[in-house]
Amino acid sequence: VSRGPLLRLALTALVAAALGAFTFRNLAVTTGITSFLSAPDEVALAGLSAQIADSPLVRTMILSIAAPDPQAARRAAREWASELAAHPEVASLRVGPGEDLAPAVYSLYFPRRHLFLSAHPEGEIPARLSDAGLRALAVELRSRLLLPEAPLVRSVAGADPILAFPALIERFERERLGGLAVRDGHFVDREGLRALLFLTTRHSAFDGARQAELGRFLDQSFEALDRRLGGGLVLERSGPHRFAAAAEQRAREDVERISLFSLVAITAAFLALFRPGRLVAISSLPIGVGLLAATAAGLLCFGELHAITLAFGATLIGVCVDYPIHVIAHVAIAPAKRAALRHVRRAVVLGALTTVAGLAGLAGSEVAGIREIALFAAVGVLAALAATLALVPSLAGDARPTRAALGLVGAIARALGGPRSPAKLAVPAAALLVCAVGLPRLRFEDDVFRMSLPADPAWEREDARVRERVSRMDAGRFVVAIGADDEAALRRNDAVHERLEVARAAGALEGFRSLHALLWSADLQRRNLEALQRVPELERRTLAALEREGFRPEAFAAFSPAPAQGAPEPLRLDELAASPLAPMVSPFVVRLDDGVAILSFLQGVRDPDALAARLADLEGVHYFDQQRFLAELFGRHRARATGLVAAGFAAVVALLLIRYRSPRLALAAALPAALAVGATLAALSLAGIELGLLNVLGVLLVLGLGVDYAIFLVESRGEPMGVEAAMLSISLGCASTCLGFGLLALSAFPALRAIGLTIGVGVLLCLVLAPTALLLLDARRPPP
Amino acid sequence: MENTVVHERSAPRRSALRATLASIGIGLAAATSAAEPPAPPPRSLESLLAEFRALPGVSARFREERRIALLREPLVSSGTVYFAPPDRLVRHVEQPIASTALIEGGELRFGAAGTERSLDLETHSAVRGFVDGFRLLLAGDLAALRQLYEVHLEAPPGAEDAWEVALRPSHEPLRTAIESIRMSGRDRRLLALRIRERNGDETRMDFSDVRTDRRFSDAELAELFRLPDP
C-alpha cells in the first residue's frame, strides 16, 4: 500500500477520532415523544400520555400475598415490606394507610368543613340552611345518633350540627379505599384474605433492565420469605414492570441472536466473493464514519438527539453499506479498473445524492423530530459517501474475485445477456400484477399495543385479578383537566366532576374516581364560605331547630358558622400533597412541563364518543383513552410519513431527470424501486398483514436501496463487465441488508417483525427488479 | 391481669359447687333454656371465651338506651341482633327508625331510609370501640380483645353462672373516647352491654330471647346478614 492511501486513512482516522471525541463529550439523548408531534392538542395530550407513563401511578406495582390464613398473609407482608424498602429501586412502599391519616384528615378538613358544603353553593346552601332545611338537619342528626356512626357524629356535632364534617368523611370513605379494606393497619382485599402492598419504583416501569433486576429480587426474596414462614404463601402482582422487562429482554435476545448470525453470514458471504479478507473491515469504515458525523452534526444543530433519531437515522445510513461493496466489486471484476472507478464514483455519488434528495422530503415536515432524522441521515449518508470515495478505491486496490464470484458473474452475464425477451419482462409484469391485486386490499393497523410483544396470558390474568382487588376502574381511560396552574386545573376538575355525575346518573358510565372527593378549587371553597355568610341568623335558627328536636342548645356552644374574621384559608393542592393524604392525591395529579393535569378515572364507559361529547365544550378538558389516542396518533404519523416518503421519491425522480436529462433513463433508475415498494406492500397485504407506521418507515429504506441498485446498473452499462460487477455488488448488498434487517422478520416482536418483513421482502424485490432498468434502456450505451 | 388472678382464686370454689350441683342432679341446664344443652360455668376468661367460640350462632332481641349530653332525653331503640361466626354481626333496628348495621370483616355497613354508608373500622377507632368489643366477645377472640383492651373477668355475686367482662381501652385513640365497656351475662348468654364514654355519655343494651344455638342456613345467612335494598 502506497503512502497516499495511508495518509488518507490516517486523516480519516483523525477526523473520526475528533468526531468521536465530540460525540462522547456532548452526547445527550432524549426520549420525549413531543418532538414527534405537531398539533398543540396532540403535543399536550401526548406529553400527558408520556408523563403518565412515567408517573408514580404507573410506576406503582401492586403485590398481593395470600397465605393459609389472613393473619399469616399480613405478617408476611409486614416482614417482606421491611426487606423490600431497602432495595435501591424501591422509591416507596405502602402496606397500610398509616396511623397519621385520621388525625391529618381532622386537622386539614375540620376547620375547613364549611368550605366543602356544596358543589353548587349559591343554590344549595340557602335551601339547606333555610328553616325547613335546618329542621330536616336536626331530624337527621337525631336519627344518626341512633346509627353505628353515632360516636363519630357525636364527637363533632357540638361544633358542627349542620353535619358538614360527616358529609366530608362519607365522601372520603367512598374515595379513599376503592376496593381496599384495612386490617391491623394493613391494606387487604375486600374479603380480607390477602395482604396488599403498593411498591413504587424509582425509575420508569418501562425501564426493562432495572425492572428485570427488581423482578428477580422480588422472586428470590419472596421465595426466601415463604421458606422462612413455613410455606404456603402465594404472590400475585400487577403493574407494567415485568411485562416491560420481559418484552425488552425478548427483543434484546432477538436482536442479539439475529445480529450475531447476520455478522457471521455477511462476513462469510463477503469472503466467499472477494479477497483479501481485510476488505470486510474496509467496507464497514464508511458507515462508521457516517454514523459519527451524523451524531456530531445532530448534536451541533440540536444540542441533543432523540432516541428515535439515533435508531431510525442509523438504519437509513445503513444504505451506505452498498457504496464500498459497489466499489470493491468493480475494482475486483472490471478489466479496466481506472475506467471502472470513474463509473463507480459517478454511481455512488448519484446514489448518495438521490438518498439525500429522498430525505429532503422528510426535511419539509412540520414535525421537529422528523426534521432531525432527515438532517441526521443526510449528513451520515454524505459522510459515508466521502469516506467511501476517499478510502475504499485506494485501500481496496488489490481486491480480487473468488472463484465463486466469477461463477456468479458468469451466471449473471448469461441471464442478462441476449435480446429483450418476454421471459425478461415476466418479473416486472408479475410485480405489476401483485400490485394490482394487493394494493387495493391494503389494511392498516395503528394500535401501538399490538406492536408490543404479546404478553403471557397467565400474567395478564394475574394482573387483572390483582387490579380488580384494588380498583375496578378501566385501565388507560380517564378524563383529564389541564390548567396552567393548580387552581386553573382544579376549577376545570370541578366542572368535570359535575359532568361526570350527570353522565353517571344518565347511565353513560358506571362510576368514576375523582380528586374532587378530596379537594375543590379555592374558588369553589370561597364561594361556599360566602354563601354561608349570606345566610341570615344561621346560629339562632339552627339552635332553635335543634331545641325543637329535643337537643340541648347549650351543648352547641362551639357552633360558630362562617365567621367574618378568622375564616380559614382554602385548602390547596400543595398543602394536601405535603400531608399524610399524599398517597391518596398523587394518582390524580400529573405535573406537566407547563402546567398541571388532574385525572378522573372511569369505570364502565358505555359510549366513549357520547362521553367525549358531554365534555367537549369544557376548555382544557379531554376524554382520554390512551390506547385509542395512541392508535390515532400513529395513524396520523403513518399518513404523514406516507406523504413524506412520496414527496421524497418525487425529489429523487427530479434529481434523476436533472442528472440524465432523459425521462427514459430517469424512469429506468426510478421504476424498479417504485415497483419493488408497491409489490412489497401488496405482497404483505395479500399475506394478511396489516400495515402501520413501521412498515412505511421500512419503505423509505427500500426506496433508497432500490434507486441505488438501478442507478448502479444504469451507470455501469457502458463499462466492460460493468453490469455484471454491478449485479454482483447489488447481490452482496442485498444479502447484507437481508441478513442485517430482513432477519428481523423472524423476531417474535411484532415491531421488529414489521420492519424486518418490509425491508427483507422489499430489498429482495429490489434485487429481482433492478434489471428492469436495463429493459428500459436501448442498448449498453454509456449515460450522458 | 388482676382480675385473672381473682378469678383463679375463685375457680376451685365454683368447680366444687358445680360438682355438688351435678351430684344432686340439678344441672345448670335448669337455669337456662330447655332447648340448650347443659354447659359448665366458665372457669376462666379463656374458658368463657372458648365457649363463645364454640357457639354455632347467636340471635337476641335488644333494647338500647343512649344517654347523650346533646339530648335532653335518652334515645331508645329496639330490634334484633344476629351473630354468625367468625365475624359477621348484624343489627336490625325496628324502633323508632328502621335501620340495619352489618359488620363483616373489618367493615361496617349500615343503611337507613334508603341510604347506605360504610365505615372502615380500622380507621374509625371510636366507632370500632362500640362494636368490636361486643363482636369479639361473641366470636370468642380473646387475643383480638386483648390487642384493644385490658380485659377483666369478674364474677358478680348472686348467680353462680353469671359473669361480667370489663374492657378498658389500652391504646389511643380509643382510650380518649371510651372509659369502659362492661358485658354481662349468664352461662353462655350475653344479657347486657354498657358503654361509658369519657364525655359522660352512656349506652346500655339489654338482651332478651337470647339463643346461642342458632345454626344459620345459607338462606338465613343471605337474608339476615345483608342491608335492605334501598
Image: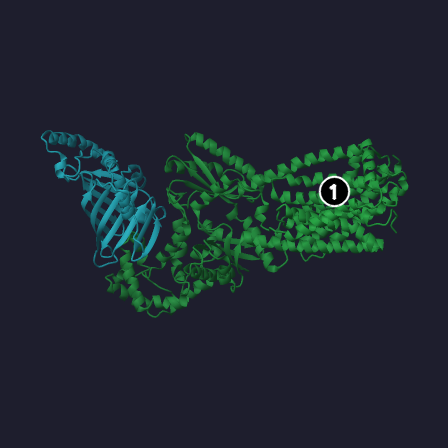
Chain colours: A green, B cyan
Q: In the rendered structure, the residue with mark 1 lies on which chain?
A: A
Q: Residue furthest left?
A: B24
Residue A505: x and y in percent read 41, 60
Q: Is A447 placed left or right of A755 in the picture?
A: left
- Asked whether residue B133 appears in the rendered view, the answer is no
Residue B86: x and y in percent read 30, 40
Quick one: quadrant of the C terminus of chain B? Answer: bottom left
**Residue annotated with mark 1:** A20
Decide which of A327, A418 is in the foreground and name it: A418
Residue A411: x and y in percent read 81, 37
Quick one: quadrant of the N terminus of chain B? Answer: top left
Q: Is A134 placed left or right of B27 in the picture?
A: right
Say which element carries label 1.
Answer: helix
Q: Quadrant of residue A281?
A: top right
Q: Quadrant of residue B44?
A: top left
- Asked whether residue A451 appears in the rendered view, the answer is yes
Q: Is A274 placed left or right of A691 in the picture?
A: right
Residue at 38 percent across and 52 percent down: it is A173
Q: Quadrant of residue B27?
A: top left
Residue A385: x and y in percent read 80, 45
Q: Is residue A383 above or below residue A504?
A: above
Residue at 40 percent across and 37 percent down: it is A73
Residue at 58 percent across and 52 percent down: it is A631
Decide which of A506, A284 is in the foreground and name it: A506
